[in-house]
Every structure is written in structure tokens, then in C-alpha cells.
Amino acid sequence: MEMLLGIFSAFGLSASAGLNAYIPLLVVGVIAHYFPNTLTLNQPWDLIANPWILILLGVLVIIEMLADKIPAVNHINDLIQTFVRPAAGAIVFAASAKVFSDIHLVFALACGLLVAGSVHAVKSVAVRPVVTATTGGTGNIPVSIAEDVAATGVSILSLILPLMMGTLLIVFFVLLAWWLSQRKQRTT
């Protein structure tokens, strides 16, 4: 059961990184630093809990949150984050999935990269352009705030209630697959 919970936690955290690259890293670092009995990070991932890294992550969270709320800058931010978010998802997946110690590190990194990259792709290709087009850009700020809140909530819940987060992620990906198949059928 511990292995399953670890997998669900890692998938939830990497999905959160697809919305905001630095929030799940900061959550994992803060919990590992202040509550080491709750979350112990193996080397080299234990660097995430270093106080200097936590300060850096806090600054990066603020920068990303602000950049995502400024019109035009948010599009540049999404372009830059196309590379950062999947990398952050890979790191947080590998760092939090201590159950993968018997499985090759590249597999853990690839899982995190794919999950965070998928969530980021849905956000930046399917959701944000529709919000911008339908609201003339005025809906981007509330959607960005909702994404930040969701990333924080998913990150925390992934560590506290990983079974619930795993179930929600499975439902999300099933609905996403269904939506994409329906969309493909309408275009053909």
C-alpha cells in the first residue's frame, strides 16, 4: 500500500507542476524541512529542503504568479514555462517517489516530465487560448489565480491524502481522453 500511495503522491505533485512549476517544489521542500518525519527526501533531492533553496523557490513562485497575471507577459511566461514545468514535474516526481528507489531514476523522471508536460499542454493550448478569446483577456487573471490555488491544493493534498489525489488524477485523465476523442470525432 505504501508503494501505491507514493506513486499517487508523485503523480499528483507532478500534475501540480504542470500548473505552476515552483509551488509543488516549495511545498515538498517546506514539508521536508519543517516536518522531516512526514517526508524524508533521499539524496540529491534533499537539497530541495535547504533553506536557501526554499528562499529561491519562494521568490520564483512570486515571480511566476506575478508574470502570469500581467497581460502579454503571461504568454511569454507560458512559453518559457513550456520547458520549466515539465522539468519541475520530473524533479518533484523523482524527489517524492522514494518508492521508486528500486526502479531506474530515468523512469521516474520520465513519468514526472510526461504528467507535468501534459497538464501544461492542456493549460496553455486548450484552456488559456479559449479564456483569452472568449473574455478578451479579462478572464486570464481569475483563471491564473484559480490555477495557483489548484496547484497549491493539489500539492498539499498529494502529500496528505495521496489516495484521493490519485483517484482524482485518474478521473481527470479519463475525462481528458474522452474529451479529446469527442473533439476528434467532431472534426472528422
Image: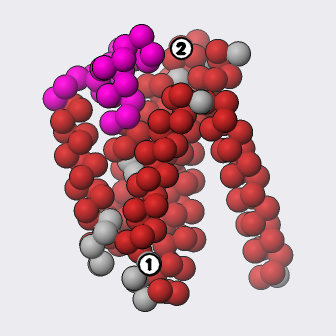
Report if residue 70 is visible in the image.
yes
Give the residue displayed 77% in from the left and 82% down from the top: 187
Specify the label residue 1 is tagged with. Answer: none
Give the residue displayed 65% in from the left and 17% down from the top: 3
Give the residue displayed 31% in from the left and 20% down from the top: 34
Tell me where residue 64 appears, x and y as whole percent.
Answer: 28, 56
- Where 35 falls versus 184 (above or below)? above
According to the image, label 2 marks what residue? 101
| 93 left or right of 48 in image | right
- Quadrant containing the C terminus is bottom right
- Where 127 falls versus 155 (above or below)? below
User: Dot 1: what SS?
Assistant: loop
Q: Is residue 35 magenta?
A: yes
Q: Nearer the viewer, mark 2 or mark 1?
A: 1
Residue type, label 2: Ser
Tell me where residue 2 appears, x and y as whole percent.
Answer: 64, 15
User: Dot 2: what SS?
Assistant: helix
- In front of the other: 165 or 175: 165
| 177 left or right of 87 in image | right
Across the whole image, how many numbered discs are drawn on residues?
2
Query: Label 1 neighbourhood size at 10 Å, few (<14), some (14-19), many (20+)?
Result: some
According to the image, label 1 marks what residue? 139
- Quadrant containing the N terminus is top right
Distance between mark 2 and mark 1 Cα atoms: 43 Å
- Where 2 falls versus 59 (above or below)? above
The boundaries of the magenta stretch are: 26-52
Give the mark, 2 or 1, whose residue is nearer the N terminus.
Answer: 2
